[in-house]
Image (cartoon, coloured by chain):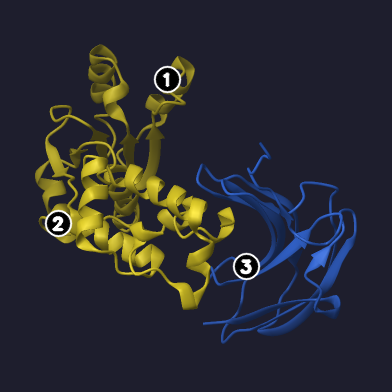
């Protein structure tokens, strides 16, 4: 089993749309790790069918068994992180060792006030 | 409760794999060669046919088959002719076709499909009714299976009577029963998040 870690700069996990999301990833594995990717994506979760969109990925060349690499993404302007009762949109980074399938995931929030937008169905009568 | 926290959200429900009530997975796999690797998984809606079909995929891959998945449902009710022609032309004995929703084909279309997939190494279909191919497995549910799933997803042992009512309300359709539970948690689930206020039963939310 490999150890993988994703750390954002200053351990921030909430960002503005269009902002830079940077940090470093580390991994330790007992054998040749093979290809490793860091993916920035969002997905929906809730009652219905899931949607997922890979926004950008970084493939790390010639990864060593114990290694540390920096990353930098520029977040798109949308969609925003939000949660309602039927659906949530969740942004995340995922570090994947493609050969072993080992993964590490870090959820982040992307919105104009850096907090998840709460959508409720309550309408004042 | 936020959708992402709902224990009955789709991605959580999809982690639940098929639970064998009668027989075993191994026994079913052993029947496949006897059926010439062509069989049907039958059962009513929400009985786990699609889940079982998905569960077969790694076992068939381990037998060196190349898996091709086909699906017809309310969103896609038929295959484009060009797609089918290309699909049939490329089939070899190494291919194993898993076809979810085969009963949606017309009788004639099904007979053509069955004939033209004979060159494939195998074919398993799901259907609400028997008769398309020899029955490999008949899926069914029980209130006990529903209880297991509710407990796994919600982490709370539900009361037998409440599970039975939920089960009966949906005529054994576990998919619909779990959708109802999503709504129950969505409407009143804030209490569920609080460990101190954990409900005694699911239906009491």
Above or below, comparing residue B162 to residue B199 in the picture: above
Of A59 and A113, the residue lying toward us: A113
Q: CA distance from mark 1 to mark 2?
A: 39 Å
Instruction: Find the residue positioned furthest to the front.
Output: A125
Give the residue number, with chain letter if any, for mark 1. Answer: B85
> Earlier along the polypeptide chain: callout 1 or callout 2?
2
Q: Residues within 10 Å of mark 1 (few under 14, many from 20)?
A: few
Identify the element where label 3 is drawn.
strand
What residue is shown at x 44% (from left), y 55% (from top)? Answer: B8
Give the residue number, with chain letter if any, for mark 2. Answer: B21
Q: Mark 1 vs mark 2: tell me if same chain.
A: yes
Identify the element where label 1 is drawn.
helix
Q: Which mark is residue A96?
A: 3
Q: CA distance from mark 3 to mark 2?
A: 36 Å
Above or below, comparing residue B47 to residue B163 in the picture: above
Kindly tell me whether residue B19 is visible in this rendering.
no
Using the image, name the chain to which the residue with label 1 belongs. B
Of A56 and A29, the residue lying toward us: A56
- Mark 3 or mark 2, whichever is nearer to me: 2
Above or below, comparing residue B194 to residue B43 in the picture: below
**Residue B40's image quarter?**
top left
What residue is shown at x 90% (from left), y 54% (from top)? Answer: A18
Using the image, name the chain to which the residue with label 3 belongs. A
Chain A color in figure: blue
Rendering coords of residue B137 (x, y %): 15, 45
Q: CA distance from mark 1 to mark 3?
A: 37 Å
Q: Mark 3 vs mark 2: tell me if same chain.
A: no
Rendering coords of residue A98 (x, y %): 59, 65
Identify the element where label 2 is drawn.
loop
Tell me which chain appears yellow.
B
Q: Is residue A70 left or right of residue A59?
A: right
């Amino acid at each position: 089993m490999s150890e993988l870690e994703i750390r954002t700069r200053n351990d921030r996990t909430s960002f503005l749309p269009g902002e830079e999301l940077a940090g470093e990833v580390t991994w330790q594995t007992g054998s040749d790790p093979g290809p490793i990717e860091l993916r920035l994506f969002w997905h929906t979760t809730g009652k219905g069918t899931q949607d997922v969109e890979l926004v950008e990925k970084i493939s790390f060349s010639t990864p060593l068994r114990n290694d540390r690499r920096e990353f930098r993404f520029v977040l798109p302007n949308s969609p925003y992180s939000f949660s309602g009762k039927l659906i949530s949109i969740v942004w995340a980074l995922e570090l994947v060792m493609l050969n072993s399938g080992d993964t590490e995931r870090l959820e982040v929030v992307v919105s104009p006030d850096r907090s998840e937008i709460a959508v409720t169905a309550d309408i004042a009568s | 409760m936020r959708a992402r926290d709902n224990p009955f959200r789709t991605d959580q429900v999809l982690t639940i794999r098929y639970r064998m009530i009668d027989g075993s997975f191994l026994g079913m796999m052993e029947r496949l060669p006897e059926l010439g690797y062509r069989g049907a998984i039958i059962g009513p809606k929400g009985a786990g046919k699609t889940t079982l079909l998905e569960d077969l995929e790694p076992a068939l891959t381990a037998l060196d088959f190349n898996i091709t998945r086909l699906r017809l449902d309310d969103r896609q009710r038929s295959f484009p002719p060009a797609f089918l022609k290309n699909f049939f032309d490329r089939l070899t004995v190494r291919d194993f076709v898993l076809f979810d929703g085969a009963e949606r084909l017309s009788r004639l279309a099904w007979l053509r499909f069955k004939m033209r997939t004979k060159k494939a190494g195998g074919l398993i279909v799901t259907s609400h009714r028997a008769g398309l191919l020899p029955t490999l497995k008949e899926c069914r549910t029980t209130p006990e299976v529903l209880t297991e799933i509710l407990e796994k997803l919600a982490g709370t042992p539900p009361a037998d009577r409440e599970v039975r009512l939920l089960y009966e309300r949906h005529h054994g359709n576990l998919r619909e029963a779990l959708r109802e539970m999503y709504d129950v948690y969505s409407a009143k689930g804030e209490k569920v998040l609080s460990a101190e206020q954990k409900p005694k039963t699911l239906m009491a939310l």
